[in-house]
Each structure stands twice: as structure tokens, then as C-alpha cells.
Amino acid sequence: MLSSENMETSSVVLPTNITGNVSTTAPPTNGTVFNKYAGEAIAFVTGSKAGMAVGIIIAIVIVIIIVLCVRQAIKGLQEAKERAMSKLGALMKRDESVELLDATPDTELEAVQPASSDKKKLENLGNIKFSLAYDQERSELRVKVYHCDGLPMKFVGGTVYTYVEVEMFPFHRMTPEKPRTKYIRNEFSPVFNDEVCITINKEEVDDQKMYLHVCDYNQISTRDLIGSCKIELDDVSFKAKGKEIVYEETLRWIDSVRGAERGDIKISMQYYEGESQLIVKVVECKSLKPFPGRVSCNSYVTLNLVRGSKVLTTKKTKVVKKNLEPKFEKEFTFIVEEHLLDEVNLVIHVKDKPLIGRKRLIGELCIGCQGIGQSLAQWKLMVNKEVTMWHQLELLNIVPGKTDLQTTMAVLHGWETTSEEESEEEEEEGMFTGLLPGGLFSSDSKPPEKKPKKQKVSKRQSKL
């Protein structure tokens, strides 16, 4: 028997009866809701007349859209085909009016000009016949091109438009468009019989080098050089009364088309008097000559502001890799007092920085009080006015801060260092002659007035 205490502490669990409707299914999800409504929609469309009508309308709209897209695509293709056929018809009509030569199939492959890196290997570039004459009354140099013989092809097949470009260096250095003859189509021995007249003073003719470039017109690169002929006009004895001197020369490949042996550099300069600031912008280089064994350059430009045997400031541009015509577009600021303009020079070096090996000098330039020709002209004209000029790179062997620029520039250009009076007269008379076609100043305009010579001040007085 259980005691009364155990009866009180123990509890008996009795089953509980639950009444009412209780659902044991899971709650609906998104999938079940979608299936439910989708089924109702399908039942509506297929089970009622209104649903069938809506479905048919939707199907018709989709079919109409597809038909319109296909029709528009077919129409665009037809228009493109018509345009292409019209252009082809125009080309065929133009070609029918010109008698084409059958020179291409009969041309030997040895006469085809090779790639740009192997142009020197092609020996037979053809011949050119021309004449030179100078008219004293009109101050004109007449160049008459008669014909060319045995020109090589630029490529097998295609159309050739041959012409001759006449370039005088440095007369045409600042001229973007050089005089040229007419075009001759599809001729490997073209007959021009065309004359080019250049207005130039007789005194300037003797200082020029003439290049006759035989070219093939190219819509992409403007021209393809076939071969060139070089004439030193200083060695030409022109006949009286404008009589012609006939030449027959062999064409050869000239590395620099523009006449410079090491390339050219474009410099923009401006000096602000009030702020004593010299702004120099290195724009670009053209026709840089790579070193033997290389086809390109990793070029950069250094600028040294030099006063006597002291380098005041040094600047340099970034390196432009694998480019013989690099564009720098870099601007530099130099602080130069106005009274120092007659004592300082800007020495510019263009260098090549190969991936392996030491840096090499491509060319250099000196712009300043010791400059010659265009270098001196730009230095004189840049005060309160931006002056942009092309300069030919040379090999001057200038070490900034060590080289005596006055002696170097005088020896390089054949100047004799005489008295101060003689040098001042040469500077007055010949500073601006022959720099540009026709000179910097016309015959009617007056040359710039000479500035009064400044008195030299000793270092002790300048400190005081």
C-alpha cells in the first residue's frame, strides 16, 4: 500500500481529448501559389471564349513584331547592297576611261620593293631625268622633271600614282607642303614633263640642298617613298639667261626624307618679362635615326639651362618607347632674370634609352645667346610672345657646364672670332636672313632695332 505522502506527491497524466478541426498540412509557398494561378490562367484561356480571344490577340501581336523586324533587316541589307553596287559601278566606269597596263603579271619579283627595314638592300631604284635653271629677273629656281625609268613596285598588284616632290633644305623646313609634279597613273617609267618654280633669292640658293623624292601616293600614309636624288646647289653653276642644266641621276634610298641626318625637334618658347619666367615646351621629334642594329628608339629629352661653366637648372621628359617620331607635349618653367638673357643658353639633348645597355645621344641643340640661325632667332623673338620652331638635331659634343659654347658654335659654323664690332655687324646683317622661305621679314618691313649694349657688371658690384 502506498502511503498518504506518496499519493500527494505523485501525479497521474491522463489522456486529453482535443476537439475541433485542426489542419496538419504545410503552409503554401511561392511555388504553389504560382502554380495555382498559372493553372487558373491556362484554364481560363482554354476553357472560355474570352480567354481564347486574349490568347489569339497576344499571338498575333508577337507574330507581327517578328515580321516587322525581319522585314526591316531585309530592307537594310538591300540598301547596303545597292550602295556597294553603286560604288562598284562608279569605280568600274572610271577605270574604263583609263587604259590599264599589264605590267603587273610580267614584273619580276626582284623589282618589288621590300619591307621598310630592308629598303637599303634594294639597289635598283630607277633613274630620274630633270633640269635646273635660275631666272634672275623673277628670282625663281625652275626645276623641270622629264621622266623616270625602271621604278620598282611598292607591292604586287594595285594601282600606282607616281609623282615627284621637290624639297630644298633648309628652305622648306618650315613649309608643311612641298612643291610637287602632277600624278602619273600605273606607269613604272612615268613621263612627267612638268615644271616646278620656287621663289628664292640667288644668295640663298647656294646654301641649299635639293632633294627630288619619287613617291607613290598612299591614302593612308599620304605617300610611299620609292627613291630620292640629292643635289648640292652650292656645286651647281647656273647658266646665264635662265638656260637649263640637264641631269640624269640614279635614285637611291635616303634615310631622312626631310634632309636632317639625326632628325628634327619642335620647340615652343616664351619669356615673361614681369615674372622672369622662361616657358619651354618640348612638342615632338621627327625622323629620328636609330642606332645600327635597331629599328626604333626609346627616346627622351633633357634640357640644361647653362650660364658659362655652370648648369643652373636641369629638366627632362618621360621616355617614349619604340617610336621614331615621339610626341612629348611636355612643358617646363625656368626662372631667368631679364639681364641674364644675353648670358645663358638652353642646351637640349635627345637621347635613346635601350632596355639593355647604356644611354646613347641621338642629337643635340643649343638655343640661346650663343645660338646660330633659327636657334638665335627663336631666342630673340620669344620675349612676351610664344614662338614655335623646328630645329635640326646635330652632334655638337656639348657637355653642359664644361664646354665653351662660344668657341664650339663659332668653330662648328665656320665663324672667325674677331673684334666685337665685326661680330655685332654680322649679327645685325645676317641674323634673320635665310631662316624661312622669303625670310622672317619682308623687304618692306623694317628689321628689329638693336638694343643698346648693356654695361658689364662685376660680381662684387652685382652683390652690392
Image (cartoon, rainbow, N blue to C red):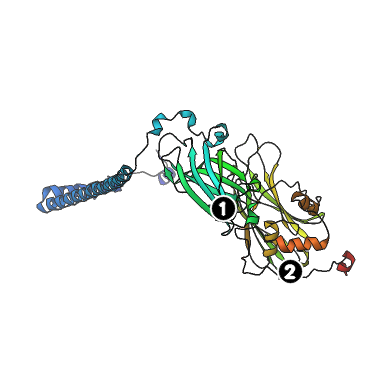
Q: Is residue 417 left or right of residue 446?
A: right
Mark on residue 242? Answer: 1
Tell me the SS state at disc 2: loop
Q: Nearer the viewer, residue 403 or 223?
A: 223
Nearer to me, 430 or 21: 430
**Horizontal and vertical percent position of residue 372:** 72, 56
The amino acid sitting under disc 1 is Gly
Q: Residue at x 40, y 35 (%)?
A: 157
| Quadrant of the frame with the N terminus | top left
Furthest-front residue in this view:
241
Which amino acid type corresponds to the residue marked 2 in the rendered image? Lys
> Vertical placement of 433 versus 362: above or below?
below
Note whether residue 172 is visible.
Answer: no
Q: Is residue 311 left or right of residue 64?
A: right
Disc 2: which residue: 450
x then y, percent, for residue 243? 56, 50
Q: Quadrant of residue 346?
A: bottom right
Q: Is residue 384 above or below residue 54?
A: below
SS of the residue at dot 1?
helix
